[in-house]
Image (tube, grey):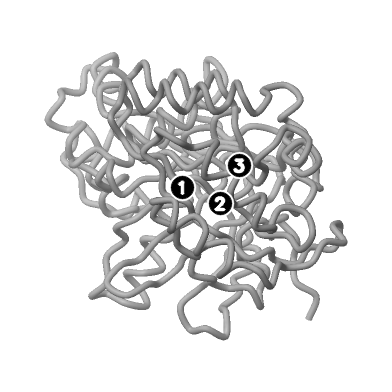
């Protein structure tokens, strides 16, 4: 009988798994075997594996319907390949029926997965399809981990010679709004006994949740930080990013300065270029001044179309870039992937395609 609410084995870090097994009299040696199968091999059918008898008995008694533990195995509702031949978008259904989107992207020499951290998003960025959905709920650590494991299984099946090396938390949701679950998931995913994704290959993107930025700095988290800025004045930014009314631009920039001072790490500032909104030479000059003294890399993103925003992509991106480079900032354009299947930046909204 199940004495309480079920828990996901994918929610557990290695030390937690050791403790769970120890409580049933199963020694730590068996935890290593189970962790490897779950996190390195991405196995979803534990009954099919040949474990030693103590672990086999524990799995039979503890994992499954009506038992204390389950596995996060989201249903693949849809898998949509892009015509670019490098991108695949997955619509995944969670145990409670809510859906999220995950994107696997290929670049020269690397494979990257873009994962969701929430179903929907509470930040309300006007040009973002997820923001237009509104907030549904936070994802558990295991639901974040499961997206990466799914991408790894797809790669192994389709391209056995390729390895998933990069992870970006730039899918549905605001990672710093769900920070406890995000950090726990990243501890699991960066564990060298499992997926082993290097912390320097993991990027957390935020629209500017100041307490989260300060926490990352105080805890000296080793991941890369990307801040979606989009405006060089409070008025300009608040028109696009409503959360700026809660954490104004000056507060956000102050937090970024503090982050740089405490960590010594570069911050990637993301800037979606929208015609007539934030793409003028004057805006570029203000941005250069705003970031003065911060170790910054500016990542320019052409606006991707979404049904709920009437803005258009800027044609002034290269002029904008020249001004920032002249001011001494590294400034690049993000490589577009999967635009034809709504897998690009700001396009995820957990919608099933209509055939």
Q: Choose mark 3 or mark 1, whichever is in front.
A: 3
- Does dot 2 land on a helix, a strand or a loop? loop
Query: Image point 75% across, 61% down: which residue?
Result: 351
**Which of 31/147 is in front?**
147
**Which of 152/27 is in front?**
152
Query: Image point 54% across, 59% down: which residue?
Result: 300
Residue 312 in the image: above or below residue 277 = below
Label 2 or label 3, whichever comes before in sequence order: 2
Mark 3 Cα shell of 10 Å, populated few (<14), some (14-19), many (≥20): many
Say the numbered circle drawn on residue 319: none
Say the numbered circle drawn on residue 74: 2
Quadrant of image for the C terminus = bottom right
Residue 349 in the image: above or below residue 286 = below
Separation (CA) of disc 2 from disc 1: 7 Å
- Does dot 3 land on a helix, a strand or a loop? loop
Say the numbered circle drawn on residue 146: 1
The image shows residue 173 at horizontal and vertical percentages of 63, 41
Pick out the residue farthest to the left: 29
Query: Image point 58% across, 67% down: which residue?
Result: 319
Q: Choose mark 2 or mark 3, whichever is in front.
A: 3
Mark 2 Cα shell of 10 Å, populated few (<14), some (14-19), many (≥20): some
| 221 to the left or right of 240 | left
Residue annotated with mark 3: 229
Whether residue 153 can be seen here: yes
Asked if disc 2 and disc 1 are in contact, CB closer than 8 Å, the reply is: yes
The image shows residue 186 at horizontal and vertical percentages of 37, 36
Residue 201 in the image: above or below residue 124 = below
């Amino acid at each position: 009988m199940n004495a309480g609410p079920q828990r996901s084995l994918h929610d557990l870090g290695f030390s937690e798994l050791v403790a769970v097994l120890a409580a049933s009299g199963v020694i730590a040696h068996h935890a290593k075997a189970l962790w490897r199968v779950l996190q390195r091999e991405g196995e979803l059918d534990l009954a099919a594996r040949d474990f030693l008898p103590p672990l086999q008995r524990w799995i039979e008694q503890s994992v499954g319907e009506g038992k204390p533990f389950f596995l996060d195995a989201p249903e693949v509702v849809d898998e949509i390949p892009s015509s670019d031949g490098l991108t695949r978008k997955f619509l995944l259904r969670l145990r409670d029926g809510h859906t999220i989107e995950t994107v696997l992207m290929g670049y020269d020499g690397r494979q990257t997965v873009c994962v969701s951290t929430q179903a929907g998003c509470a930040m309300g960025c006007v040009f973002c399809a997820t923001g237009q959905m509104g907030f549904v709920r936070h994802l558990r650590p295991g639901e974040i981990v499961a997206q990466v494991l799914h991408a790894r299984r797809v790669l192994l099946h389709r391209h056995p010679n390729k390895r998933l090396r990069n992870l970006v938390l730039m899918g549905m949701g605001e990672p710093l709004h769900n920070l406890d679950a995000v950090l726990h998931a990243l501890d699991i995913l960066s564990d060298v006994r499992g997926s082993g994704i290097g912390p320097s290959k993991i990027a957390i993107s935020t629209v500017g949740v100041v307490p989260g930025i300060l926490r990352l700095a105080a805890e000296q988290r080793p991941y890369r930080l990307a801040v979606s800025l989009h405006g060089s004045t409070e008025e300009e930014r608040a028109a696009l990013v409503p959360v700026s009314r809660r954490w104004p631009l000056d507060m956000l920039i102050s937090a970024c300065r503090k982050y740089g001072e405490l960590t010594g790490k570069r911050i990637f500032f993301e800037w979606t270029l929208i015609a007539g909104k934030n793409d003028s030479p004057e805006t570029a000059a203000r941005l250069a001044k705003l970031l003065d003294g911060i170790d910054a890399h500016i990542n320019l993103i052409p606006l991707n179309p979404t049904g709920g925003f009437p803005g258009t992509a800027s044609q002034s991106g290269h002029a904008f870039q020249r001004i920032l480079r002249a001011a001494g900032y590294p400034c690049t354009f993000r490589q577009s992937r999967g635009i034809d299947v709504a897998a690009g930046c700001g396009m995820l909204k957990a919608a099933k395609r209509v055939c």
